[in-house]
Amino acid sequence: MKLTPELEKAFNAQITLEFEASMVYRQLAIEMEIHDLPGMAAWLRHQADEEIVHANKFIDHLADRGNHPKIASISGPTVTINTPLDAFTAAAKHEERVSEAIRELYRQTEAAGDLDSRPLLNWFLSEQIEEEATVNEIVARIAMTNDDGPGLLRLDEELGTRPTSTTEAN
Ligand code: FEO
């Protein structure tokens, strides 16, 4: 069943937000590369790829239902990063924004009685819990190092071993 025009608009806004999230992560990866932390940069770059997978899930859903997926204009990410803690805190904040957008999408589809979008949105609700938990854990662990060089380098090495199998793009 086709989504209503209002829901199509809301889903398209979510597609744009997922691409925006990808650009935020990609920029954060660049910042960590500049800070000579290649493991963190690799982790963030994987995450940028995963956000494109998220956008594609929404695009496929709209297309499957006979709607018209459309990406809106996206402004470049405006992140000011001086430390790894800044980078992952910015990631956590963006994830909170995405989570709230998914909840709002859920509320709108429920109000419209759009049962067909439930499985997809349930998947995203779970995914957001996981993504927020993962990023918040990294934020906490960076804070624990208290700017201690060896501690940061150990964490950087560990994050650089993120298996590619955890990136759904693979
Ligand atoms: Fe697509 Fe990280 O949320």
Image (tube, helix red, strand yellow):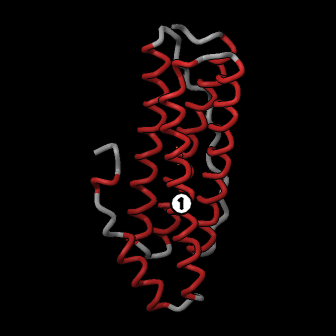
State the residue in front, 40 or 108.
108
Q: What amino acid type is highlighted by mark number 1?
A: Leu
Instruction: Name the spot of residue 35 as percent of width and height, x first.
Output: 50, 75
Left or right: 21 in relation to 152: right
Left or right: 92 in relation to 127: right
Q: Is residue 7 above or below residue 130?
A: above
* Count of numbered marks: 1
Left or right: 84 in relation to 156: right
Q: Residue at x 28, y 56 (%)?
A: 164
Instruction: Name the spot of residue 148 as percent of width and height, x first.
Output: 53, 92
Classify mark 1 as within 8 Å of ligand 1 or not, answering yes or no. Answer: no
Q: Residue 89's image quarter?
A: bottom right
Q: Residue at x 60, y 32 (%)?
A: 14
Q: Is residue 112 above or below residue 136?
A: above
Instruction: Name the spot of residue 19 as percent of width and height, x first.
Output: 53, 38
Q: Residue at x 42, y 56 (%)?
A: 45
State the residue in front, 51 or 4.
4
Q: Residue 11's image quarter?
A: top right
Q: Residue at x 69, y 15 (%)?
A: 6
Q: Is residue 114 above or below residue 19?
A: above
Image quadrant occupied by the C terminus = top left
Secondary structure at numbered mark 1: helix
What residue is shown with label 1?
Answer: 28
Instruction: Name the spot of residue 158 as percent of width and height, x first.
Output: 36, 75
- Crowding at mark 1 (Cα within 10 Å: few <14, some 14-19, many 20+): many
Q: Is residue 169 above or below residue 3?
A: below
